[in-house]
Image (spheres, coloured by chain):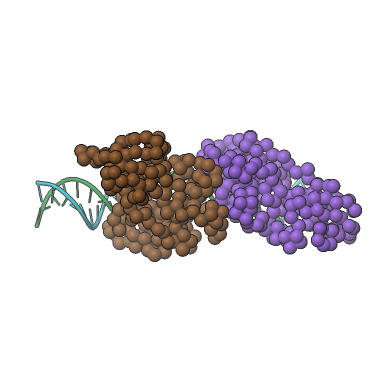
Chain colours: A brown, B purple, C green, D cyan
Amino acid sequence: MMLSQTEENYLKAIYSLTYTNSNNVSTTLISEAIKTKASSVTDMIQKLAEKDLVHYKKYQGVSLTKIGQKIAVEIVRKHRLWEVFLVNKLNYNWDEVHQMAEQLEHIKSETLIDKLEAFLEFPTHDPHGDPIPDKEGNIKHHNNTMLSSVETGKSCVVIGIKDSSDPFLKFLDKLQIQLGSILKVISKEPFDNSMLVETETASISISNQISKNLFVKKL
Amino acid sequence: MMLSQTEENYLKAIYSLTYTNSNNVSTTLISEAIKTKASSVTDMIQKLAEKDLVHYKKYQGVSLTKIGQKIAVEIVRKHRLWEVFLVNKLNYNWDEVHQMAEQLEHIKSETLIDKLEAFLEFPTHDPHGDPIPDKEGNIKHHNNTMLSSVETGKSCVVIGIKDSSDPFLKFLDKLQIQLGSILKVISKEPFDNSMLVETETASISISNQISKNLFVKKL
DNA sequence: AAATTAATTTAGATAAGTCTAAAAATAAAT
DNA sequence: ATTTATTTTTAGACTTATCTAAATTAATTT
């Protein structure tokens, strides 16, 4: 089945919205993610339902079919592998690669992405710590431990970030926090749930909004 | 100016047709190159003329403007650099990369292609021996010596191929001829202009059609 | 439970790129 | 120099993906 870039983008959006939201994704949610109008989304969803890529009942939202999910994961795989290429090989910063990967993920080829994966020596995570699905579409999801849940006095390693938006990435750069950074929770402020954290180089105060967006592994 | 992939493809086609044919390219020629109908070409040409990318007078064919040419060369540059990447880094064969490069050449980014060029260590030619335009759009064209013009008894190196079509590339593979191959012209057959040629490994008969498509440097 | 608000869908319109069929212009042939 | 053939252009239609505005359904509030 040969899908247009637009169709692929819808599948990808539905896929990630299914994770961050309910099982049945609403038209408006998709329209916000894809930056179109809800009416356009309805049209496209009906088209995707025709092709058996989504389950759809009027007014009930959508979910991906097995095939739809498979395709969505393939796109995620491509996106993340291209991001690794851009950062590891072309020396881009992690906050510069999203737009390019959004285009590269739609390149059509039976073999390209597997060759790229081999060339990159089978990375398991992209530059933001997100896991890269394997050829069969299996993903090892994060264990979901956020910095906010680390106890006072305990240390942890940053293994991923939930919100990979540009401003957030730039902010982490400023704080000199990156994947692999070791953080020790010195104290927590019950009032606003902020925490005082010690990095390798400095002590910094981290708001709850930040600490809820950092995946960590406790040490 | 943000061009669509389709517009870019028209510019690229006009660019290469200008070289292999007359200065003013006809509608039908373009339609054959792009595999559309002549009427579609007329529509698109008028659109490109509106944008000052081509010179166009009804029934007189088209030629690229300075800007149009600049953009066309940029696309050629991207195409060839991506081909180098695919062959040198991902281990594709030279007959497998065209379709992928056709897609990759349209990836939009201010910096990507220059970073890629650096990563590839500033190659001067693509896997088919075609010269890679530099950042400013300068190209060193072939000196245009074809195998067919090499005198009997003289040797030469293969430095490029004129027709990079799939079947031709596969045919050269079968003959074990590649860029850098050294060929010695043993004899010429006046009847059909074929020639007997000695490679490193064998003696082969080469038709005029082939020898007219191989760029060589005389030794 | 009825009324109001919000979300979703339908209907009709638009832009890009293509097509077919017909008309116009150029080129070739007698 | 006319006629014939070929090429090019125009006109109108189709597809994909989008939009606005109106209609419908679902959710909330009173």
Q: Is residue A83 left or right of residue B85?
A: left
Please state which of residues B212 and B128 is positioned toward the viewer in this rendering.
Answer: B128
Q: Is residue A15 left or right of residue B73?
A: left
The answer to whether B11 is drawn above or below residue B179 in the figure is above
Image position, residue A59 (x, y; %): 27, 57
Q: Residue A163 sits in which quadrant?
A: top left
Q: Residue B206 sits in which quadrant?
A: bottom right
Q: Residue at x 45, y 42 (%)?
A: A94
Count every numbered label the image shows and give the total.
Answer: 0
Please state which of residues A118 and B127 is positioned toward the viewer in this rendering.
Answer: A118
The answer to whether B147 is drawn above or below residue D20 in the figure is below
Q: Residue at x 49, y 49 (%)?
A: A84
Image position, residue B166 (x, y; %): 67, 58
Image position, residue B53 (x, y; %): 59, 38
Please state which of residues A142 and B125 is positioned toward the viewer in this rendering.
Answer: A142
Q: Residue at x 84, y 62 (%)?
A: B203
Residue B11 seen in render: no
Q: Residue at x 34, y 35 (%)?
A: A203
Residue B21 seen in render: yes
Q: Is residue A201 left or right of residue A100?
A: left
- In the rendered image, the residue lying farthest to the front is A153
Image position, residue B128 (x, y; %): 70, 51
Please state which of residues A187 and B145 is positioned toward the viewer in this rendering.
Answer: A187
Q: Is residue A156 left or right of residue B149?
A: left
